[in-house]
Image (cartoon, helix red, strand yellow):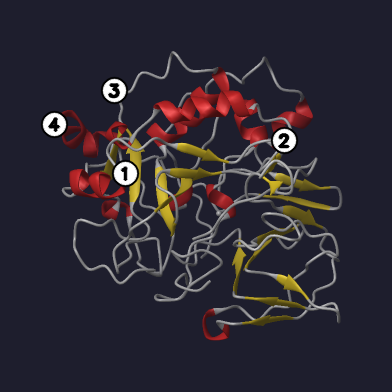
Amino acid sequence: MRIISTFLATTLGLLACSGPMTGGTTAAVPTVARETPPPVGGQPSADDAQSATALPHAASPSCALFPPDNIWNTPIDTLPRHPLSDEYVAAIGNETEFHADFGAGIWPPDDGGPIGIPFVVVPSDQPGVAVSFEYDDESDPGPYPIPPDAPIEGGPQSDGDRHILIVQAGTCRLYELYDAWPRDDGGWDAGSGAIYDLGSHTLRPAGWTSADAAGLPILPGLVRYDEVTAGEIAHALRFTAPDTQRAFVWPARHFASDLTEPRYPPMGQRFRLRADFDVSGFAPQVQVILRAMQRYGIILADNGSPWYVSGAPDERWDNDVLRQLHQLTGNDFEAVDVSGLMLDPDSGQAAVRDEATFLPAVVARR
């Protein structure tokens, strides 16, 4: 289980590209044209527009969160419904409410940490530090460019998952740690760690953990405030479920369970908000999140509370507005079969499909 916390960086807003029981090459391909919804709260400034699509740094190119044809960034709204959809949804909870596991402020109110999973952008010359891993046989050795004030999930005193997520500008590499603890000598101890080239489709070795249970990156699946303000989240979102199968499906690389019954969803299973779900009655910010759930879906990435959707903490979130997500339940979702997009089981690159290819499967919903 990974409980979440946050950090607010003024340069946030990346292009959609996110332990124990956890663990390629860019191709220029055409993508299906889509209409971009208007930004929330009016037209964004030039700075806002850049921050909604990339992580800029003054001395380096912007870093996209994986290529546009990566599975994280690929729409799944026209893909076939998974034949075990009903069983998977029931295993997580048909009537169970959704929950935004991110927001403003701290939790618990008196002595807690920021609500969500934090991340930070560091310059290309940020010094690397040594990290010792509990699961060193499935962790990338580093060093890791951890700044002295690196935001830790749950705060410095947290006894939770203590994730640290770092994007290094210039190199465009993503560094993620699970259960990270600073040492007096300047190094760190951690449960596990993973390093990703954000311009690549390469997945972790099959069977390897990452900083997340499914062996996936965490940052690409977070809801980020600047994306919502810009009016579109163009990537899948990360979520958790209490009981998962001892199996994983592409693009996940690792399972985190002893349960073998097929009714439990495997790690990496994609779900989507049903196309007939009416989003019009929700606040504009929530509508952006709901449209992303319909078009890009949510990916099962860790064991945890049912239907908890991950995001980055930000003091600009309105927690009362985010609670509108509680109106959603498992019955509003369906599992999706993304196997038709896989080109290579060791690559996150998704095949380019004409949307009409999968239309009959969508029209013939049960």
In this view, 189 is above or below 319: below
The Cα–Cα distance between marks 1 and 3, rounded to whole angstroms, is: 23 Å
> Which numbered disc flags the more N-terminal residue, 4 or 3?
3
Amino acid bearing label 4: Ala
Mark 4 touches mark 2? (CB < 8 Å): no
Q: Which residue is mark 1?
A: 353
Asked which secondary structure carries label 2, the reply is helix
Residue toward you, 124 or 337: 337
Would residue 294 appear left or right of 152 to someone viewing this image?
left
* Nearest-to-viewer mark from 4 and 3: 3
**Displayed quadrant of residue 140:** bottom right
Q: Which residue is mark 4?
A: 364
Counting from the top left corner in percent of width and height, residue 162 is at: 65, 62
Q: Which residue is mark 2?
A: 50
Q: Which residue is mark 3?
A: 276
Q: How many marks?
A: 4
Mark 4 touches mark 3? (CB < 8 Å): no
Counting from the top left corner in percent of width and height, residue 253 is at: 41, 68
